Amino acid sequence: MEQQLHIALIATHFAPEVTPITHLYADLAEDLCRYGARVSVVTKLPGHDMTEEEREAFYDRRDEISPQGYRIQRVGKKARRGAKLFERALRALQNTLAIYRTAKKLKADVYIFCSKPAYLGLVGAGLSRKARTVYILQEIFPDNLVAAGKYTEWHPFVRLCRRMEQHIYRKNHAFITLSDEMKRTLVARGVQEDKIAVIPNWADTNAIQPILREENAMFEECNLPREGFYAVYAGTLGFLQEPDVILDAAKLLKNESDIRILVFGDGSLRGHVESRIVREQIDNVLLFPLKSTAQIAQIYSLADVVLVPLKKGMTRIAVPSATQLALAAGRPLIVSAEAGSEWARSIERESFGLCITPGEPQEMADAILRLHASTVPMRELGARARNYACEHASREQATQAYFDWIRA
């Protein structure tokens, strides 16, 4: 009788925390169990964007079996609201050490590590002598720091990170990236091509379905009229997403009374976005916090079109997970991506949206106006988007590919 495969999934953030990717790892853990594996999740105590009462509910739930059948071990220090930068950095180090010690005690056949934060790859490197280690790159680090404009390539911190990156690539056994462009970047970094699998992020196309406007309760929750044209952005508000492009495009559309832009997001630039909206009186932009995973379909079904802004060059180091969710909800996209990129080719081939030059608010405004005035019914564009998600980005396809690669 074949021995049951024991897979350990190591993630700093996990459900019930709400981030743009935590739903993916919950799906993955559940499906790996369904495929016959024994799954152990090691994560820190939840705290991201949670109330103190919500956090405290998990202090006595450090080791439990989920209803889906996988084990969850929550380790490390309790999060504290309002902690200073040094305290947060110290807690992150303590949590990482706690995750490493707990993972090391597991007699897993395979360890899967998530690249957010990137230093979890070091945990994988440390455990690579114990079992097979698979590193999932949601973004390529430290390229994302350089692309965001925070550091130059020759900054001492980036040079240190490059050494860490090479150690991670040298020690871990296998890697998963989200696109062929990201794979080419890894190969250029010296990773053997046969160690890399390309598995895009996914959407649960069974759970995420288009919702008719008249049936969408999110309009009431957000106090929005059902009339009008809505462009929606949902996800991280950070340097890589260039939220200023959305705000600048909105200013160009201020005289279009029928058009509103809805932003659902958190991140390092949320305060900046909020400040600009108030200071510059950008009244056609409404800002909301990220909603729970259960409300994803409602959020995207608010939209006539979904915005996917990215900095120049980002498609070679990252792919926003929100794109698949929006497509599953049957919504066309306006994507910032260079001509010839995978996203640009997909949009041109499948005709589910428009591709614009990164960093160009005028092009974003023009694209919104073009779709607003389009003679092609939005429902037809949405159907193409939905078909693309079902054929190329379904949960079942992706998690089965993970399972096959993990066992390779």
Image (tube, helix red, strand yellow):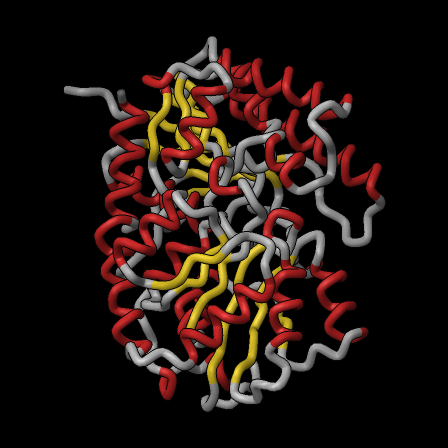
Q: Position of residue 225 (x, y in %)?
A: 51, 90
How many marks the image carries: the answer is 0
Q: Position of residue 234 (x, y in %)?
A: 53, 62
Q: Position of residue 385 (x, y in %)?
A: 30, 62
Write the residue at 47% across / 82% down: 229
Q: Nearer the viewer, residue 317 or 97?
A: 317
- Which image quarter: residue 134? top left
Can residue 286 be seen here? The reply is no
In the current view of this chain or complex, which residue is farthest to the top?
129
Write the residue at 77% across / 40% down: 88
In this rendering, would 342 be left or right of 89?
left
Q: Where is 368 relative to 29, above or below?
A: below
Which image quarter holds the C terminus? top left
Which image quarter holds the N terminus? top left
Can residue 85 be seen here? The reply is yes
In this rendering, would 21 be left or right of 277?
left
Write the residue at 27% across / 35% down: 401
In the current view of this chain or complex, which residue is farthest to the left?
1
Q: Nearer the viewer, residue 263 or 52?
A: 263
In this rendering, would 323 be left or right of 57?
left
In this rendering, would 9 be left or right of 329?
right
Q: Position of residue 337 (x, y in %)?
A: 47, 50
